Image (cartoon, rainbow, N blue to C red):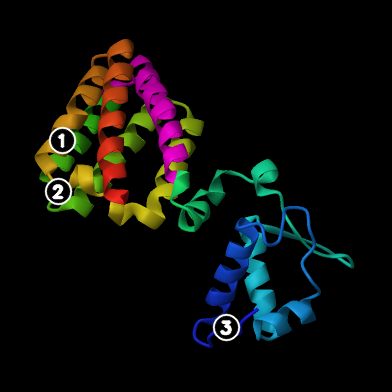
Amino acid sequence: METLPRESLVDVLESRLREDILNGHHPAGSYLPPERALADGYGVTRTTLKHAFGRLLQAGLLETRHGVGTRVRDYLRLGGADLLPMLVRHSPDWIGEIFEVRRGVGALIAERAAERVTARQREELRTLLAAVREAPDGDAVQLADVEVHRALARATGNRVYVLLTNTLFNAYLPVRASLVGPFTDAEAAHERLVPVVEAVCAGDEAGARKAAEAYLRATERIMLEGLR
C-alpha cells in the first residue's frame, strides 16, 4: 500500500478504505487487518485511522466488535438507502438503478396524490409549479422542481413516500451538477411538469400516473445524456 499524501489525511484515508471495501479488496464479512498493521500500511497514525473508521462505521460499511476487531459489513444485505449517495460517488452505474426506482415510486406518488390531495395542497402545488418557471438558472430550476416533487409526496398523506422522495434526491447529490440538463430551460421544465400537477389537482389518478411516467422518462433520458 502506498503512503498517502498529508493534506486532508482523514478524508483521503476514508476515501481509500471506502474504495477498497466497495471494490471487494476487503470483502463483506471479512475482518480488516489489525489497526497497527493497517495504519502502517497506509502510512498514517492509529488516531487518523480511528477517525476514518468512525466515518465508515457511521456510513454503515464497517462494524466493530469489542475484543474481536473491525469487520466489513454486508451493506447489500444489511444496509439502507442512506448509503446511496456514497455508492453513487463510488460508481455512476448506480444512477441507472436509482432512476428505475424513481420511475416506479414517482408514478405511484402522483397517483396517490391525485386520490388524496387537499384544496390547500392544490394551491401549494400550483405555487411551486410557478416557481419552476420563474427560477433564474438551471440550478435554481432543478431545486424548484425538487420542491414540486416533495409537495406531491406530501399530498399522498403518507410520510414514507416523503422520506423515499428525500432519499432519491439525496442520492443524486454527488452528481447533481451533471443532471441539470432538463432544467436549463425554465419554461420547458415548467411545461413538462404541468400535466402532472394538473392531473393531481383534478383528482385524475390514472392521468396523474400516466403524466408522471411521461415526465420521469423524459427527464431521465436528458439526465443520462448529461452523464455520458
Residue 214 coordinates in the image, percent (x, y): 27, 24
Q: Amino acid at mark 2?
A: Ala
Q: Helix or strand or loop: what does disc 1 sit on?
A: helix
Q: Amino acid at mark 1?
A: His
Q: Is residue 166 visible?
A: no
From the image, tell me which residue sits under label 3: 4
Rounded to the nearest whole Å, what is the CA distance between mark 3 and mark 1? 47 Å
Numbered disc 2: secondary structure: loop
Q: Residue 109 colored magenta?
A: yes
x and y, in percent, of residue 84 in the image: 51, 48
Q: Is residue 221 above or below residue 24?
A: above
Q: Is residue 223 magenta?
A: no
Q: CA distance from mark 1 to mark 2?
A: 10 Å
Magenta stretch secondary structure, dominant = helix
User: Could you give the CA–CA distance between mark 3 and mark 2, rounded to whole angstroms?
Assistant: 43 Å
* Most distant residue in the right direction: 67
Residue 221 image position (x, y, % from top left): 28, 36
Residue visible at 69% across and 83% down in the picture? 47
Residue 27 vs residue 119: left or right? Answer: right
Query: Disc 1 designates what residue?
Result: 190
Which segment is the magenta one? 95-119
Residue 93 appears at what percent x and percent y?
A: 46, 47
In the rendered structure, which disc, 3 or 1, sits on the residue that comes first in sequence? 3
Q: Which residue in the protein does label 2 denote? A: 135
